[in-house]
Image: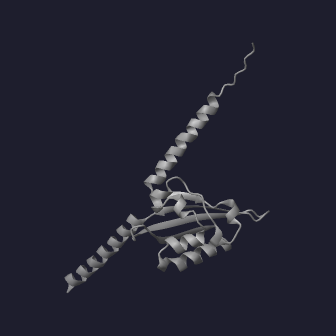
Amino acid sequence: ALSVGTDVTEEREQQDAIARNNAIMDRAQSIAHMCYWPARPESASTAWGDCTFSYSDNLEHVFGYSLAEIDIPLAQFIQRFVHPDDQADMIGAYRQFYQGEDQRFAITFRLKQRDGGYRYIRDFAEKRVDVGNGAMELVGMSQDVTQQTAADAMLRESEIKLRRAHRLAKL
């Protein structure tokens, strides 16, 4: 009987390296309170408000919602989850990014939570358009910056108090 075998050692080592790198990336995203999201290709060629996204596994850690809860077109997401005072700015910014010439985009908004509170989320995105067929690729990331935003507010308040104390000390 003739037996034929294939050495898969190198392929297995490559798969293990990819798995290790993916685990490191997942951990890094968790540490930074962020997730990534490419636009689904079939939705990126439609109107900006109809665009839908795929998300990395730690989506719920960042947004506080599961994929099933937020897997809706962008315009509906903004209406349902974004603070009313942030909606117009977010609509305008995403529309301009989607339709305009800018290749990069960043915006901070408040995302409603189940308990009625809000998280501050910072979105960053990049756009590439194929000059041949006009196909658009959108890739972005969202980061929960709630703690950073609160720390910045406390710092501003401390600076105000320090300036007041300094003025009073001179009197």
Point out residue 152 in the picture as x, y percentages from the top left corner: 37, 70
Point out residue 112 in the picture as x, y percentages from the top left corner: 45, 70
Residue at the image point whose x is 21% and y is 84% from the top: 168
- What color scheme is it? one colour
Q: How many marks?
A: 0
In the displayed structure image, the side of residue 138 where residue 29 appears, left or right: left
Residue at the image point whose x is 58% and y is 41% from the top: 18
Q: Is residue 118 visible?
A: yes
Residue at the image point whose x is 32% and y is 71% from the top: 154
In the displayed structure image, the side of residue 150 where residue 55 appears, left or right: right
Image height of 107 relative to 5, above or below: below
Which image quadrant: the C terminus? bottom left
Image height of 83 relative to 27, above or below: below
In the displayed structure image, the side of residue 27 where residue 2 appears, left or right: right
Which image quadrant: the N terminus? top right
Point out residue 96 in the picture as x, y percentages from the top left corner: 63, 75
Point out residue 147 in the picture as x, y percentages from the top left corner: 38, 64
**Depth check: 64 or 33 in front?**
64
